[in-house]
Image: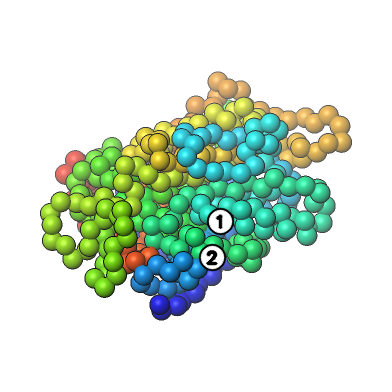
Amino acid sequence: MRFCYVAMGLLLAATAFAQARPRAHDLGVPIAGTRGPLNGITDVAGVEVGHTTLISGTGQLIVGTGPVRTGVTVIHPRGRANGDPVLGAWFTLNGNGEMTGTTWVEESGVVEGPIAITNTHSVGVVRDAIIAWQMRRPGSQPWALPIVAETYDGFVSDINGFHVKPEHVFTALDGARSGAVQEGSVGGGTGMVCLQFKGGIGTASRTVDIADGSYTVGVLVQCNFGGRPTFQVAGVPVGQEITDFMPCFALSDVAIPAGARARRCADASPSPSAGAGEDGAGSIIVVIATDAPLLPHQLKRIATRASLGVGRTGGVGENGSGDIFIAFSTANARAAESDGVRTVQMLPNDLMNPLFHATVAATEEAILNAMLAADTMEGANGLRIHALPLDRLRVAMGKYGRPLRR
């Protein structure tokens, strides 16, 4: 097996990487709302994101060796240097997945420390590494309940080889930065499949004016959900227009794993294959940040609205999908301190509708950005997951009267 190992621990600034493929807004996909300057979760002041990406090997799956297509992504709500907790809440549309630490979030209304996303079988090591990282920092409390979420990358990666190590988590935690967020096949999203195209990490933001204030909602997703038939872009049934480019096995000299329904890529059969993502199996993690002054019960309402953004792209919370969302507010600094009565601010519920619209739109766009940024990937046993083909997307959108920019 050819071995090539890549670890990227920094959130790359806009000048440090070139987004090889256009984002949804660049194409003119008609999704409502006013975008922030970066159109990402880091438009919320203080938020930092870090990735470690692990890519190695090609060919037949050998457990413990590879191929490896995985990683970890971390979000610091107030930045890695600021341990002040934020108010937060979580919601699950369908619970066939994991997000650790959420019983305490539900009980306390507080998010303490970073939020991490990785593959299904690396949740434990990421959680433990976050604890070790926190315990080394001055002023840390003597216990920790980290928030670590997952989606399954075992179609293309050696998930049972446990390749994510503590040092990879430390690199992502220490390398997190503000600025433009790298999208696509990076970090925890490296090996993910979304609507049976290549998925991964995506982000978007919206700004809203409420009363006398201006507020930002930023969303980051790890997109690994859904089947092709329900895939939509701004209401256009793209999944029904692009029925080819399905997952397939590219290597003729490697046996197709028992039970796999994907065909070989060289098979000229006109019938599309199923394979990765069939029957809506998979998951999506959505992290929502805002600087609007909201209390935990209101953030629960925000987290719930992410479901509508997922639904707009084709997700329906299928049985095999873990659709888990968490929202936090960077307002109300020091609200979690225990030295007496705290005073907090909140927007009235009657003024929350713009934030709901912002959450839905940013979630929808973040999913599309994840898919648009991701290139075609071949992984374990030569399974090929195709990138969303831009030329075919343009044709489909134009057919329904929504032409895209070139």
Seen from the viewer's position, the closer of residues 299 and 102 is 102
Q: Is residue 339 left or right of residue 179?
A: right
- In the displayed orientation, state which residue is furthest to the bottom: 2
- Image quadrant holding the C terminus, namely bottom left
* Lower sequence index among marks 1 and 2: 1
Quadrant the N terminus occupies: bottom left
Disc 2 marks which amino acid? His
Task: Determine if residue 373 is in view.
Answer: no
Residue at image position (47%, 50%) is 151
Looking at the image, residue 389 lies above or below residue 15:
above
Answer yes or no: do the residues labelled 1 and 2 have beta carbons within 8 Å?
yes
Q: Residue 195, how many percent across, how many down?
A: 33, 47
In the image, residue 74 above or below residue 58: above
**At which x and y percent is residue 240?**
21, 43
On the image, the x and y values in percent for residue 21 come to 35, 61
Structural crowding at the residue carrying mark 1, measured as other residues with C-alpha within 10 Å and reported as few (<14), some (14–19) or many (≥20): many
In the image, residue 289 above or below residue 308: below
Q: Is residue 134 left or right of residue 183?
A: right
Q: Which mark is residue 122?
A: 1
In the figure, residue 158 lies in which quadrant?
A: bottom left
Q: Residue at x 15, y 51 (%)?
A: 271
Residue farthest to the top, as pictured = 350
Q: CA distance from mark 1 to mark 2?
A: 8 Å
User: In the displayed structure, would residue 350 be above or below residue 373?
Assistant: above
Under circle 2, the secondary element is loop
Q: Amino acid at mark 1?
A: Ser
Q: Which residue is mark 2?
A: 163
